Image: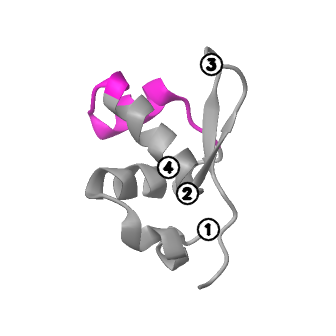
Amino acid sequence: MPNVAESPAWATLSNSERAVAELLAASETLRTNEVAEVLGIPARTARYTLQKLVEKGVAEAHGSTRSRTCSIRAIRKA
């Protein structure tokens, strides 16, 4: 499992983004509804947070909008 805390982007993440990044790091891939269910947050919040992680280069999105999954990017030590 990648150590997301070693990523240079880690310092720029909000608490909610860190929670989602840690969840992604513990799983191979996750869908928005899975993130929402596990963390007890609205699906809309999970979708927004996943998109922010993708924009920051912490996560990768796979697939089309309806069947999209996300995974943590390979992280190198800073």
Compute the Cα span from label 2 to label 4: 12 Å
Q: Report the mark closest to the observer, 2 or 4.
A: 4
**Residue beneath label 4, please?**
53
Q: Earlier in the sequence, mark 3 or mark 2?
A: 2
What's the residue type where badge 1 is placed? Pro
Answer with left or right where residue 10 lies relative to residue 42. Answer: right
Compute the Cα span from label 3 to label 2: 21 Å
For residue 65, which numbered disc appears in the image? 3
What's the residue type where badge 4 is placed? Leu
In what element is the residue under mark 2?
helix
**Residue beneath label 2, please?**
25
Residue 31 point in image, percent of width and height? 55, 29
Q: Earlier in the sequence, mark 2 or mark 4?
A: 2
Q: Residues within 10 Å of mark 3 (few under 14, many from 20)?
A: few
Read off the magenta span.
29-44
Q: Is residue 28 above or below residue 34?
A: below
Decide whether residue 36 is among the magenta residues.
Answer: yes
**Residue beneath label 1, please?**
2
What's the residue type where badge 3 is placed? Thr
In what element is the residue under mark 4?
helix
Q: Residue at x 43, y 30 (%)?
A: 47
